[in-house]
């Protein structure tokens, strides 16, 4: 899923202080599952902003509404009445959410309350790890089902660099060397010979480096 | 001959090659390079010109390589994948060849988080192996990576690095074999202090036929102090400094002298290892130690005997 992390409150203050009528817009999909910006967190954030504004003697109002999926206009449509008269929409969705709001509600300023960190997996309770960078040409069949593009600090294709040590990456003892994992997995699958083959340069044109991507499912009418 | 470089001639003649390292300055002063080149001249067959080593911005390796050529010394220009994509790399290779560079060392490069611009964006469009392959095709086809023809091929002797001390150990010789398959002519290893482990690595290389298909230069370096030994042991990823080396330096009355002795001993031992074609002496910011190391080891550059 898309993993998000709330921005520090000092940033939120910078966004909200100049405004009067603020609507905090939560999202009940990814950002709710990673306990960052669902209904509950949106309400907590609104309460904190209200408290801060009272202390600073700032007037205005701060209210909350939560949509099921902020990355779809269909759901954002439902809050049209709530948006009426606001001068700031503070979104707690991943960064697609505030952009969707900006697209739908063109006359209102929008701010992100979250930092969108990664496409990640829940490793344990409250811990997420990056697993994919959406390169557009998934090659993990060749690497034991483990992604070296998202999980190797140098995005290597042909095995561990000279800094791999004791299963850890050269950048930090807290980071796993994913190529050690790929190596061990391929050995355990009896596929180590595959790692001896040279993997050619990656075609990055399928990734964001090819320009912003649009996906159209064939055979469907809009 | 692939490039006609001195290094290539020495290695192909079967003479024992000596290469050294010359780090460009963190400034625009050509004199720094000229001075270092004159210390190293006559003591090495060629010198590596590092490319933003440890991700610290410095004078570029191409300009420094040309300054070294002007001093009558042969450069081995280093090229990393961290700071350039395949367009920039190919452009730089053609430019370097036009300026007279004949040896190119292909590296992935240290991660940018180690250097003085940890906020920078790492490129890593290619890795060392895909880079080697690209350079080989530029020279031998000759064509750009996209397949388009190159009108005048860059004649380069292609090198790479190998680290016998990184993990997973059983894959290190295999990875070097991949570099050979990709097109290298020579390789320089990580600094050796643990000779036993290096011997094990070399045995694997011989088994894979690597030492027959490329020239292996053993990496060595003089330690300047016990503190430096400890730092390398603890902090530098992929380094193996045995405790007894650290102890020798800490108990020595003259640590620098002892550091040179340790280096000379390593040279004497690796020379005897089957498949070792030369040494690469990395005396970074201590270039003056090289003539002394050569003297104590009874070494002369291979080119002296050609
Ligand atoms: S190879 Fe690409 S698509 Fe597959 S997991 Fe890695 S980044 Fe994602
Ligand atoms: S140590 Fe492993 S994960 Fe880190 S950059 Fe090298 S190969 Fe990639």
Image: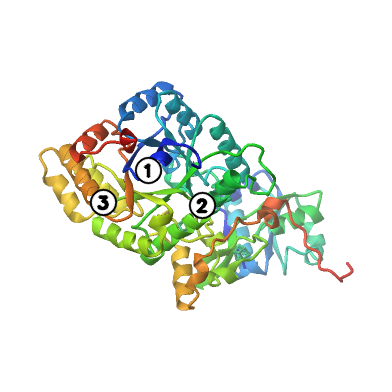
The answer to whether the residue labelled 3 contacts the one labelled 2, judged by CB atoms less than 8 Å apart, is no
What is the crowding at mark 3: few (fewer than 14 residues within 10 Å), some, or many (at least 20)? Answer: many
Q: Give the Cα distance between marks 1 and 3.
A: 19 Å
Q: Which chain carries label 3?
A: B
Going 67% across and 48% down the picture, which residue do you hit?
Answer: A59
Image quadrant in which the C terminus of chain B is located: top left
The kind of secondary structure element at disc 3 is: helix
Quadrant hosting residue B299: top left
Going 15% across and 50% down the picture, which residue do you hit?
Answer: B247
Q: What label sits on residue B183 in the rendered view?
A: 2
Going 78% across and 60% down the picture, which residue do you hit?
Answer: A82
Ranked by sequence position, the earlier of labels 2 and 1 is 1
Are discs 3 and 2 both within one chain?
yes
Above or below for B299 versus B276 = above
Q: Which chain carries label 2?
A: B
The residue under label 3 is: B270
The residue under label 1 is: B13
Left or right of B170, for residue B273:
left
Asked whether B236 or B280 is in front, the reply is B280
Above or below for A107 versus A97 = above
In the image, is the residue at mark 3 within 8 Å of ligand 2 by its beta carbon? no
Asked whether B118 or B50 is in front, the reply is B50
């Amino acid at each position: 899923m898309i993993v998000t992390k709330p921005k520090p409150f000092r940033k939120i203050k910078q966004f909200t202080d100049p405004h009067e009528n603020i609507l905090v817009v939560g999202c009940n999909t990814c950002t709710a599952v990673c306990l960052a910006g669902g209904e509950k967190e949106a309400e907590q954030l609104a309460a904190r902003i209200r408290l801060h504004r009272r202390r600073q003697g700032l007037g205005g109002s701060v209210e909350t509404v939560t949509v099921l999926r902020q990355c779809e206009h269909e759901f954002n449509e439902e809050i049209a009445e709530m948006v009426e008269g606001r001068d700031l929409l503070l979104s707690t969705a991943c960064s697609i959410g505030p952009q969707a709001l900006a697209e739908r509600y063109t006359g209102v300023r929008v701010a992100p309350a979250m930092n969108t960190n990664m496409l990640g997996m829940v490793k344990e309770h409250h811990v997420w790890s990056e697993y994919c960078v959406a390169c557009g040409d998934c090659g993990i069949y060749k690497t034991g089902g483990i992604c070296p593009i998202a999980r190797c600090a140098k995005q290597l294709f042909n095995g561990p660099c000279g800094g791999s040590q004791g299963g850890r990456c050269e950048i930090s003892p807290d980071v796993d060397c994913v190529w050690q994992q790929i190596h061990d997995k391929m050995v355990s699958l009896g596929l180590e010979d595959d790692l001896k083959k040279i993997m050619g340069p990656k075609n990055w044109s399928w990734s964001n480096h090819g320009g912003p991507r649009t996906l159209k499912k064939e055979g469907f009418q809009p | 001959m692939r490039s006609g470089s001195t290094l290539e001639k020495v290695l192909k003649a079967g003479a024992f090659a000596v290469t050294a390292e010359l780090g460009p300055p963190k400034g625009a002063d050509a004199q720094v390079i000229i001075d270092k080149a004159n210390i190293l001249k006559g003591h090495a067959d060629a010198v590596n010109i590092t490319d933003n080593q440890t991700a610290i911005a410095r004078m570029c390796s191409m300009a420094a390589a040309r300054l070294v050529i002007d001093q009558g010394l042969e450069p081995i220009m280093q090229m990393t994948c961290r700071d350039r994509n395949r367009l920039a790399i190919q452009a730089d290779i053609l430019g370097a060849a036009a300026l007279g560079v004949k040896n190119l060392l292909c590296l992935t490069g240290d991660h940018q988080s180690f250097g003085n611009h940890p906020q920078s964006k790492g490129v890593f469009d290619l890795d060392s192996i895909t880079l080697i392959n690209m350079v080989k095709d530029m020279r031998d086809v000759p064509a750009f990576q996209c397949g388009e023809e190159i009108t005048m091929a860059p004649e380069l002797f292609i090198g790479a690095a190998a680290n016998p001390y990184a993990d997973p150990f059983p894959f290190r010789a295999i990875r070097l074999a991949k570099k050979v398959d990709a097109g290298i002519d020579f390789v320089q290893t990580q600094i050796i202090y643990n000779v036993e482990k290096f011997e094990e690595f070399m045995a694997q290389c011989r088994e894979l036929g690597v030492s027959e298909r490329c020239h292996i230069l053993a990496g060595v370096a003089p330690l300047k102090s016990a503190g430096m030994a400890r730092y390398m042991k603890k902090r530098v990823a992929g380094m193996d400094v045995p405790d007894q080396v650290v102890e020798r330096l800490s108990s020595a009355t003259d640590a620098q002298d002892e550091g040179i002795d340790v280096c000379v001993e390593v040279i004497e031992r690796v020379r005897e290892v089957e498949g070792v074609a030369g040494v690469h002496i990395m005396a970074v910011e201590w270039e003056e130690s090289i003539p002394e190391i050569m003297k104590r080891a009874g070494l002369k550059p291979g080119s002296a005997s050609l």
